[in-house]
Image (cartoon, grey):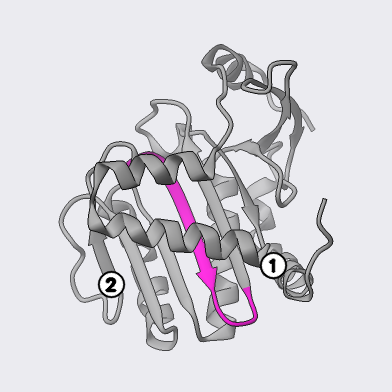
Amino acid sequence: MLAKTRCESRTTKKFHSKLKPYHHHFEKGPKAVSLHGGRDPRQVRLGDAVKIPDSDLHHVMDPEAMLAISHAIEDIAGEIRQGELIATFQDFENFLPEKKRYTSLAEDLDTVRVWGCGPVPKNCGNVDFVQTCDERLRRYWLVLFDSPDTRAVLLGRQVNKARKFSDKKFVGFYSFNPYLVQSIRWRFNLLSCGLTKVISHWEKSVSLPDLKMCDLERMLKAPDVD
C-alpha cells in the first residue's frame, strides 16, 4: 500500500473533524458492511458491519452513511473556498433539499457542477447543472472535490432496485488520494460529451466490485447489531 501524501494526511484530519456533526446518522446501528475478496477475484463477499466505513476500502453503504460522508466533503470544500466540486443526483428533485447548501458553495468555489435527470432547478446562482438521463450514470453517487492542496472523493453505485431513498444500498468507497481523485475527475468530466463509449470506458475505469444480490438480500433481512 502506498504511503499517504501530505495532502492526503491533512485532508483525512479535516474530514474526521467535519464528519463529527453527522455522527448521529450512525447511532442506530451499522450503516455499512465491508467487502472482502473471495477465491474468485471477480467475486466479493460481505464482511463485518461497521458504523463508519474506512477510507479507501469498499463497503456496502446505506443512504445515511453516503449522505454524512458527502456533507463532510462538502464542508471541506466550503472551508477551502477554492477548487471544483462535482456531485451527482439521480434526479434533480433530490437536489432540492441541498439547494441552499450548494448555492452557497458556488459563491466561493471556482466551479460547482451538479449532474442529474429531470427539469433543471431554478435560482441556484453559480451552480452549473449537467442533464443526463442515462440509466447507467443514474446508478452512481459521486461527490468529488479537487483543489490545489485538498482533494476528496466519494463514489458509490446503487446495487439494489429500491426507489425509496431510505431503502437504497450502494457499493463504493471514499478516498483522499490526490492521484485517484484527479483521475476520477478527469474521466468523469469527459462524460459531458454524452458518448456511450465514453460512459462504458468510465465504468470500467472505476471498477467497483460486483456483489451477489442473494448475499445483499440476506444482509438486508438481517437485524442490526451493535
Residue 216 percent location from the top left of the image: 58, 20
Assign a secondary structure to mark 1: helix
Question: Please, which residue is most extreme toward the left here?
Answer: 119
- Asked whether the beta carbons under mark 1 and mark 2 sit within 8 Å of each other, the answer is no
Q: Which quadrant holds residue 10?
A: bottom right
Numbered circles on residues, count: 2
| Among the two numbered marks 1 and 2 on one chain, the one whose residue lies closer to the N terminus | 1
Would you name the residue on which mark 1 appears?
15
Would you name the residue on which mark 2 appears?
128
Is residue 95 something that shows in the picture? no
Residue closest to the eye, 13 or 148: 148
Which amino acid type is marked by label 2? Asp
Residue shown at 50% from the left, 57% from the top:
184
Q: Comparing marks 1 and 2, which lies closer to the viewer?
A: 2
Residue 37 percent location from the top left of the image: 73, 26
In which quadrant is the C terminus drawn? top right
Residue 204 percent location from the top left of the image: 47, 39
Residue closest to the eye, 124 or 213: 213
Residue shown at 68% from the left, 40% from the top:
28
Above or below: residue 129 compared with residue 137: below
Above or below: residue 100 compared with residue 90: below
Which amino acid type is marked by label 1? Phe
The magenta segment is 137-150
Number of other residues with Cα within 10 Å of mark 2, as a class: few under 14, some 14 to 19, many 20 or more? some
